[in-house]
Image: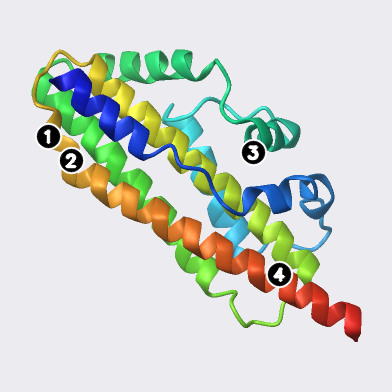
Amino acid sequence: MRSVLVSILLAAGLTGCATVSMVASEATVETNLSASESSLRKVSDAYTDLAERKLWVEKSRGLLGFARVLMEGTSDKEGSQDSTYLALVQSEAPTESQQLAFVKADIESAAHGLDVATMEAEKLFGEGLTAKALRADLVSYESALVTAKKARRTFISAIAGLDTEDVNFASYALTELDLSIDKARDAADTLADYAAERKREESLS
């Protein structure tokens, strides 16, 4: 029963992001802006850095690696990252209850961090930024969204690897993370549309 529930939870979080294809081909150019980073880019980058430090996701292989993930999906190395995180949980939390609490706290942290990035993204709507700046913000925000989805997979794999039948302990936290991911996906779509609109306006000016 545990394996069935875990499989359902895992499958539910693997839907794609509608906007990533628009920005992947422009990522190299748009993230090399000379201007100071926006709040959204700082928050999004900090979110990915946190996820890497906490071993929710494997360390980034750079911009080209990110673009490859956007276009081709996750790599075969995801399984090894799941094992790395599970080993961390078991070393930091020796008892079953502590392990469950450890993972639950990380899930809640992942949801909160993505929500903060989404709030920064929503502040950009209607602000009159250039299309170039908006696309750079969108690339960073999309990266944070991809990070959150990969972290969710890591969390569920860790739950499956724990010696417990209580898979419901983190159900509320996982639901909150799913809601955060859905909200971020919608915000990214809106930001992509806004960037395209600004590009059209600039071409006519």
- Label 2 crowd (10 A; few <14 / some 14-19 / many >=20): few
| Residue 158 vertical position relative to residue 40 in the rendered view, above or below | above
Q: Which callout, 2 or 3, points at the residue further toward the start of the chain?
A: 3
Kindly indicate whether the residue at mark 3 contacts the one at mark 1 (C-beta within 8 angstroms). Answer: no
In terms of secondary structure, where does tag 3 sit?
helix
Q: What residue type is labelled 2?
A: Ser
- Label 1 crowd (10 A; few <14 / some 14-19 / many >=20): few
Kindly indicate whether the residue at mark 2 contacts the one at mark 1 (C-beta within 8 angstroms). Answer: yes
Image coordinates of residue 168 in percent, x first then y, are 12, 34
| Residue 109 vertical position relative to residue 154 in the rendered view, above or below | below
Q: What residue type is labelled 3?
A: Leu
Q: Residue sitting at 79 percent across and 46 percent down?
A: 25
Numbered badge on residue 195 = 4
Q: Tell me, what colour scheme is on the image? A: rainbow
In terms of secondary structure, where does tag 4 sit?
helix
Q: In which quarter of the image is the C terminus?
A: bottom right
Q: Which amino acid does label 4 sit on?
A: Ala
Side of 139 where 166 appears, left or right: left
Label 3: which residue? 70
Label 1: which residue? 168
Side of 9 where 198 appears, left or right: right
Q: Residue sitting at 72 percent across and 52 percent down?
A: 23
Q: Which corner quadrant of the image does residue 138 belong to?
A: bottom right
In terms of secondary structure, where does tag 2 sit?
helix
Label 2: which residue? 171
- Label 4 crowd (10 A; few <14 / some 14-19 / many >=20): many
Q: Residue sitting at 73 percent across and 69 percent down?
A: 196
Q: Which callout, 3 or 4, points at the residue further toward the start of the chain?
A: 3
